[in-house]
Amino acid sequence: MCLAIPSRIVEINNGVAVIDVEGIRREASLLLLENPSVGDYVIVHAGFAIHTIDEEDAHETLKLLREALAADEERGK
């Protein structure tokens, strides 16, 4: 199963983005996107940014993921 986590582009160098998810940074290819920009939120799969996502939707998705994780951790206690 894949989990699509919105990531914000913080840097672009030669078609490769540095993406950030709550302080964790990784690289992702921008080959599949048209006109990506620093500050855009993207969905990344297998090292490729495959889709841009609205900032508000990205924040809502991250909020829901945090809530799901907290609920799962609570059940595990």
Image (cartoon, rainbow, N blue to C red):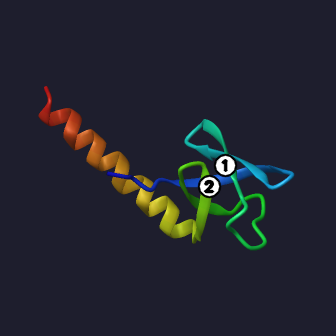
Disc 1 residue crowd, few under 14, some 14–19, many 20+, Cα 10 Å: many
Query: Could you tell me residue 10's position as x and y percent?
Result: 74, 49
Observer-nearest of 57 and 4: 4
Numbered mark located on residue 9 in the image: none
Residue at x-position 21% and y-position 43%: 71
Residue at x-position 62% and y-position 55%: 48
The residue positioned farthest toward the top in the image shown: 77
Q: Give amino acid for label 1.
A: Ala
Pointer 1 and pointer 2: residues touching (CB < 8 Å)?
Answer: yes
Q: Is residue 18 left or right of residue 77?
A: right
Above or below, 54 against 9 in this view is below
Query: Could you tell me residue 43's position as x and y percent?
Result: 54, 60
Residue at x-position 60% and y-position 37%: 23
Query: Could you tell me residue 7's position as x and y percent?
Result: 58, 53
Q: Give amino acid for label 2.
A: Phe
Residue matched to label 1: 28
Residue at x-position 53% and y-position 68%: 56
Dot 1 falls on a residue whose secondary structure is strand
Observer-nearest of 71 and 44: 44
Dot 2 falls on a residue whose secondary structure is strand
Q: How many marks?
A: 2
Disc 2 residue crowd, few under 14, some 14–19, many 20+, Cα 10 Å: some
Residue matched to label 2: 48
Q: Earlier in the sequence, mark 1 or mark 2?
A: 1
Above or below, 28 against 43 in this view is above
Distance between the alpha carbons at the discs numbered 1 and 2: 5 Å
